[in-house]
Image (spheres, coloured by chain):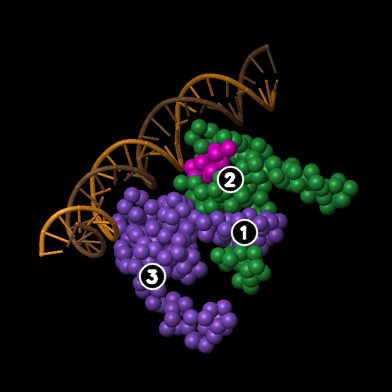
Chain colours: A green, B purple, C brown, D orange
Amino acid sequence: MTLTKNTFIGEYSYSLDSKGRINIPSKFRQAMSEDNLETFVITRGLDPCIWVYPLIQWQQIEKDLKSLSSLSKIHRAFVRNTARYATPSTYDKQGRIKLTPSLVEYSFLKKEILIIGMVNKIEIWDPIQLNNVDTNISKINPEEYDALSDKIVL
Amino acid sequence: MTLTKNTFIGEYSYSLDSKGRINIPSKFRQAMSEDNLETFVITRGLDPCIWVYPLIQWQQIEKDLKSLSSLSKIHRAFVRNTARYATPSTYDKQGRIKLTPSLVEYSFLKKEILIIGMVNKIEIWDPIQLNNVDTNISKINPEEYDALSDKIVL
DNA sequence: GTAATTAACCCACAACTACCCACAATTTTA
DNA sequence: TAAAATTGTGGGTAGTTGTGGGTTAATTAC
């Protein structure tokens, strides 16, 4: 049961198999396949996790990156660090993707993994990392969220 | 007899069956079906209960979440903590929804449950939790309501 | 150029979910 | 007041989903 296309919500518990494959939740696959583009871009997250962008979303990022001038040092750094770890990918007939050893190492993945819908992208986590990361709800001062009250209602 | 569409008021007493299903009051179903969108999003409430948003309502939240940049740590945390527990759902031909074990555990649901209309969303409660929660009317200082007097007339 | 390694593709199966039917209790209608 | 329709609850069945592993094709290493 899919809501909006290319929009991902929810948390799923899966496993990384001996061949380095991870299942993509069928709801997420449906949300992507509405464009008949079963293609996405896998890269490092800013937290210790893996980010998976549907193609449409990634193309927007590419467009934004093109607007940055390489005259600026910080722009060069940002473009390089964003582009270098990104790999295009598709899933197999069973709905699984293959992760590179480099990404598995970066995100500390073991057998048990968590997949989280982040609205415009998907995150793949090791459960322990997710608990310990400084963006975990238990480590956020509630007052920090107050600054968002003019952006979000709930 | 429905009043305004996508607007829910009243309290209903139902039961959680052995398959984790809960009936949605027929009045609430009528209030939602006017859009022919028998779809909603189930998630954790900020109190120990379950929140059920009609699709229209949730889509506004998604739109707001999409406007937050993942470059900001606090924004990432907020998007993750909001999106992660949300599941899209519909009701079956008998008018029931299926709750995930994770949500049942979070809200301490047993067999008997209470469904409360919260105007723009629906809450599902364990009766004991509802009595004990610190937002219960018996635990609110009436003077705290005074701060609302410029927002609500009654 | 050949061997070894890796990736892609296919099949199989257990667990789970969505869908369907049934029925008692309640409410509405005639 | 009786019949008809609706509502809430229980359970069976067929289809889907997640996971493991075997076989072939492609890539890499020597």
Asked whether, in this view, residue A69 is left or right of residue B3, the answer is right
Instruction: Specify the segment rendered in magenta.
Output: A22-35
Q: Amino acid at mark 2?
A: Asn
Q: SS of the residue at dot 2?
A: loop
Kindly report the distance in space between the C-alpha atoms of the residues bearing marks 1 and 2.
Answer: 15 Å
Mark 3 highlights which residue? B10
Residue at horizontal 45 percent and vertical 51 percent from the top? B37
Q: SS of the residue at dot 1?
A: helix
Figure disc tally: 3
Given this view, does label 2 or label 3 mark the residue nearer the observer?
3
Q: Amino acid at mark 3?
A: Gly
Is A29 within the magenta? yes
The relative height of residue B144 versus residue B79 in the rendered view (above or below) is below
Mark 1 highlights which residue? B64
Kindly report the distance in space between the C-alpha atoms of the residues bearing marks 3 and 1.
Answer: 29 Å
Q: Amino acid at mark 1?
A: Asp
**Chain letter behind tag 1:** B
**Chain letter behind tag 3:** B
* Residue B94 seen in this snapshot: yes
Kindly report the distance in space between the C-alpha atoms of the residues bearing marks 2 and 3.
Answer: 35 Å
Q: Do callouts 3 and 1 point to residues on the same chain?
A: yes
Residue at horizontal 61 percent and vertical 71 percent from the top? A142
Q: SS of the residue at dot 3?
A: loop
In percent of width and height, residue D18 lies at 46, 43
In percent of width and height, residue D28 lies at 68, 27
Disc 1 packing (10 Å; few <14; some 14–19; many ≥20): some
Mark 2 highlights which residue? A6
Residue at horizontal 82 percent and vertical 48 percent from the top? A68
Q: In the picture, residue A59 is in which quadrant?
A: top right
Given this view, does label 3 or label 1 mark the residue nearer the observer?
3
Q: Do callouts 1 and 2 point to residues on the same chain?
A: no
